[in-house]
Amino acid sequence: MTQLTGTGVVAGVAYAPARWAAARPEIKASAFAPVPEANRAAELERFEAAVAAVEQGYLERAQRVAEPDTKKVLEATAGLVKDRGLMRMARKEIAAGTAAEGAMIDSIDSFIQTMQKLGGLMAERATDLRDIRDRVVGVLMDLPEFGIPESDTPIVLLTTDLSPADAAMLDPATVQALVLSEGGPTSHTSIVARQRGIPCVVAVPGLATISEDEVVLVDGGRGTVSTEADPSSVERLIAEDRTRRDAVRTWQGPGRTADGYQVALLANVQSVATAQEAAQTQAEGVGLFRTELAFSETATEPSVTDQAKLYAGVFAAFPEGKVVVRTLDAGSDKPVPFVLHEKEDNPSLGVRGIRLQSLKPEGMLDRQLDAIAQGRKDSGAEGRAWVMAPMIATVDEAREFAAKVRSRGMIPGIMVEVPAVCVLADEFIAEVEFMSVGTNDLTQYTMAADRLSPSLVSLNDPWQPAVLRMLSLAATACTKTRKTIGVCGEAASDPLLGCVLVGLGISYLSMADKAIPGVGSMLGSVTLAQCQAAAQAALAATDPQGARHAAESILRGDRD
Ligand code: PEP
Ligand code: MG
């Protein structure tokens, strides 16, 4: 048996013949002869028609898919096709005599270079831009459409990375698993795979060694792809996976271990609509309301009254449950138009989170806290509001924030995202009532690895023992003082890691609501003592694979 290992994004086992996605055209701009002046107007028309056809194609796909998030991804890509800067660049080249194909290739490539320099989320949009480029060139050259191969029987789909347009067309009935040699857990393809429940592994080195129709075993939970797997282990893994899927489907909640230890399973939300959706699931409350995402398209700071309406809507979605509101974390990859940032070379290490207080408009934090307090009152929800600050790095910041929150009758907490908080956890917890670990940032800052970089996926892994040890410093400080500590980063949505976190002393886990049944059913299958033993084993490991394997042996019993 040969085994390749990547990053598991969606749990689940599949065993089927591998099929590679049909290759996209590989054409260089220099392959096209210059266009004589007399024909340039017609060339421009040919270009405009191809661009319009591709835009229309994305919109039609958007109409055919049901999931709102996938629809949004396709509509956003359709919007990018006619990006003004891009069109200006291409038209200029055509006017100067470049063929439409060449103009499209040149313009997109230079656009991608600019975006990659900007880094972060922008760089991840490169896949979308390449897709636009190849589709427009395909239409111009009258080539057959590339993408997912047609099949009536189950397949494992292999590809370098999938465009959002193709990802949207994934059918779980035939595509049993998706394996990418590139891509990251935050790429569009991963988002779509998660929504469709298609087992998925990304960033798999050596994937090209697998040939068309070779039968492969994919384990999305462990992030492995194997050929020539032993039939008896295939059978066992598939049976285990079937049992797991059944347990997830029928899980009812609330969150607790097999021996009854309660762990609240909460939802991450970003608007009234997402909070209301979460309230229809097994979510017991909201563990993270990312307020900056509610304002991602808001040009001027909303008044206290308008903000209060928004917060009241979120509180009202869970009138009896816990709702944790996080104050603005604008900046880096989450720009908010009304927050006036200076240009920064390293925005993820820059003015974001609690540091926004130094920016204009002045007094944003006070107005937001007033609005949260008002919203809580207006919602008629029971009890006090839980409010936390992002990107806290010093004890003074925590103390000042806590005073502002307490003076408005709310419960103050801090996010644990900066390693400094873990190192001085005892001093920090003395100032506030609770902590919530943002494992996305805690991992990027502990490992010094941009969380959005597709090349640093293996460093950006919350199973890194250094991250787990950081987190355990904070957990120990909270449990010693009987204060609450939750996790609201992506790590909380990994069923196995969720159990490890509980074993470290974490009392609530907050995640995308769709992930709750997976975490809840795993938690319900183990005891608190198993979680604690798994946590100790993971802490003792020296690499993420070792940590995961050690925890898995204790939580699920030994597997190969
Ligand atoms: C985190 O850092 O883990 C977190 C939850 O905050 P965000 O992802 O919004 O930065
Ligand atoms: Mg964060």
Image (tube, helix red, strand yellow):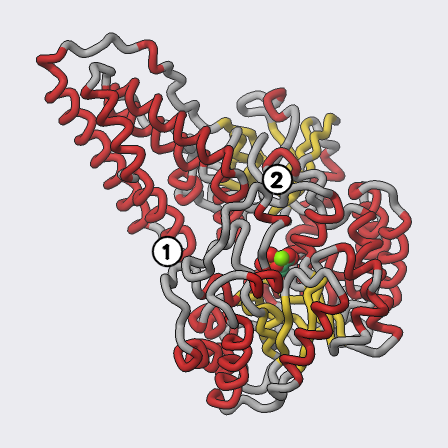
Task: Provide the residue designation for mark 2.
Answer: 201
Bin the neighbour count of mark 2 within 10 Å (Cα to Cα): few under 14, some 14-19, many 20 and up. many
Q: Quadrant of residue 422?
A: bottom right
Q: Residue at x 46, y 74 (%)?
A: 276
Nearer-the-camera pick, 51 or 82: 82
Q: How many marks?
A: 2
User: Is disc 2 placed on a helix, strand or loop?
Assistant: strand
In primary-sequence order, the first of circles 2 and 1 is 1
* Quadrant position of the N terminus in the picture: top right
Q: Residue at x 39, y 34 (%)?
A: 129
Q: Looking at numbered disc 1 in the image, what kind of residue is underneath it?
A: Ala
Q: Is residue 7 above or below residue 515?
A: above
| Ligand 2's quadrant | bottom right
Bin the neighbour count of mark 1 within 10 Å (Cα to Cα): few under 14, some 14-19, many 20 and up. few
Q: Do labels 2 and 1 touch, CB within 8 Å? A: no
Q: Please state the horizontal and vertical placement of residue 486, each as a whole percent of the image.
A: 72, 68
* Quadrant position of the C terminus in the picture: top right
Q: Please state the horizontal and vertical placement of residue 460, each as a whole percent of the image.
A: 69, 44
Q: Is mark 2 within 8 Å of ligand 1?
A: no
Residue 521 seen anywhere in this rendered image of the structure: no
Residue 58's tag is none
Q: Please state the horizontal and vertical placement of residue 198, each as a whole percent of the image.
A: 54, 47
Task: Provide the residue designation for mark 1.
Answer: 66
Q: Is residue 92 above or below residue 338?
A: above
Nearer-the-camera pick, 401 or 197: 401
